Image (cartoon, rainbow, N blue to C red):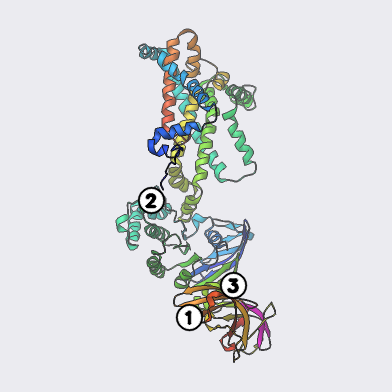
Amino acid sequence: MSLQAEVALRLGTLALDAALSLDDGEVACLLGPNGAGKTTLLRALAGLDRLDRGRVVLDGEVLDEPAAGRHVPTEHRRIGVMFQDYRLFPHLSALENVAFGLRARGVPRAEARRLAATWLERVGLGEELAARPRTLSGGQAQRVALARALVASPRLLLLDEPLAALDAGARPALRRELRRHLSAYDGSTLIVTHDPLEAMTLAERLVVLEDGVVTQAGSPEQVRAHPRSRYVAELVGLNLFRGVRDGDAVLLPGGERIVVAERDTGWREVFVVVHPRVVALYRERPEGSPRNVWAGAAEGLEVAGDRVRVQVSGPVPLMAEVTPAAVAALHLDEGGPIWASVKATEVDVYPA
Amino acid sequence: MTLEPSAGQTAGPAAPFAEGRRGARRHALRRAPLGFTPLAVVALAFLTLPVIGLVVRAPWREIPHDLVQPGVLTALRLSLVCSVSAVALSCLVGVPLAWVFARVPFRGRTVARALVMLPMVMPPVVGGVALLLAYGRSGLVGESLYRWFGITIPFTTTAAVLAETFVAMPFLVITVEAGLRSLGQRYEDAAATLGAGRWTTFRRVTLPLVAPTLGAGAALCWARALGEFGATITFAGNLPGSTQTMPLAVYVALQNDQGAAIALSLVMLAVSLAVLVALRGRWLGGH
């Protein structure tokens, strides 16, 4: 293991208590809503905020252990940090910015500038060596910040929302570039983000942080298929319920039941996932094979490409995905009472 | 948007647009509360008349001759040495204090800051008395200094420097502290993640970025030190050549040699103007 961290600290109203580990060379994404504590966790790993309890170990070296009174100051950690607002030193040129980390660690000036120039060429800014940060575009500043973090060969790279400050139009190209640099980098990387697209495309491993605690961790595919919280379910566009196995169904807190096809294998508390596209809508109560039929009301419509997402309220609130033709046929835009049905075979169940 | 004045209505709001700045000024003056305009004129006259009087009544043809009198030159040289020393001393200990105030949330910080600001507001002569009671021969610290090292501070050039430092350093501290607060810790954090130790960070990141504010604080500090009278004369005395700085020399010269007094006053006025120009927009929020 390259990084093992258990971090507990209080900052204002946030109580952060999270554990995470990274393999050598792994790229992990820390995903969560705003205020979840992602940046706080990143700052704690960088040594900028003190832990109340816990332990941080990087490549076998204990960086932080309050119980043992050990705290390695930030400047002695072999880390590279890219801040959300880049924080390029305004009084230094791009070259001097990138060379800063090397010179601070004792590399002679000429050598540091040479290495910095090499890195700036690698990120495509060979022409901007003497430019001041205020004259750089958002994308250029981002690349300088990345070069500056990587030039001293850190063991751990921490990126705080690396693409958030960029225009939406600039993001795809820079995301690809970031991916390219990360695969060339041999240390471990932790990317903090609230953007699911960034998380899904950059990460080998996802750690979901909500309200200061880790609610889920796994590969992007695992997290996408088996969400364990409302936040993740909404992010990946799935309907998620939590309940208790009861015979051939799952009993929801409100008293409603979802009939499932899978036999009871001893799980008691379970999650139930229903993909919006398997939810069928009717104006009259349907008679047919689906075991799950619920009454509700069509509340809101949302166009998603060539499908339409319909918010169905009721005892079992659902998001359904139908065609525009269906919306027209059922006059769903007018709202009103509708029936939703889901086949038991289309429902996915896994332990909570 | 078109404004069409209907019959009987004056084109009120349209006036500023039509007549430009003149119209805008008249319009604004009309909105002043009753009596404000004449009172404002009185205030302006009161504040500017003395300076105008000094410049107009100065015997300009004799000034060059008055300036090179030995007494005047001595006071000039002494003031320069003392005020620059005061600024240097203020920077040496004041910048670290400003840093601590801005970055270290210690208990009692509010009280400490209030005490540091006191010399700015305190009557200078009271400052002088306080300095005597601290560093005089029977003072809090002065007693030990005299008993163990035979050092006497009051009525020496050192005392003049200390008096000027006492009244002027708070300006530097407050200015630099504000500058450090507004700069924030962002760049210092970034420097730490790049492997820079505390001194390297201060030298290569914090200081360059706070340098303009430091310059402004030092200019303010220098102007204040140069003009100090009450604390200097009380703590350092009025000894020509060793503690008779320019303000003290002016006061004494006013009795017998008005020419010298006016010459020195003009020099100090010029310095004040220079500092004002250097600080325009920064400390005084001027337009």
Distance CA(mark 3)–CA(mark 1): 25 Å
Q: Position of residue B193 (x, y in %)?
A: 48, 56
Mark 1 lies on a secondary structure that is loop
Mark 3 lies on a secondary structure that is helix
* Within-10-Å neighbours for mark 3: few <14, some 14–19, many 20+: few
Distance CA(mark 3)–CA(mark 2): 41 Å
Residue located beneath label 3 in the image: A230
User: Residue at left 59%, top 92%?
Assistant: A289
Q: Is residue A30 above or below residue B231?
A: below
Q: Are marks 3 and 1 on the same chain?
A: yes
Q: Earlier in the sequence, mark 3 or mark 2?
A: 2
Highlighted range, magenta: A241-251
Residue type beneath disc 3: Arg
Residue located beneath label 1 in the image: A323
The circle drawn on residue A134 is 2
Distance CA(mark 1)–CA(mark 2): 49 Å
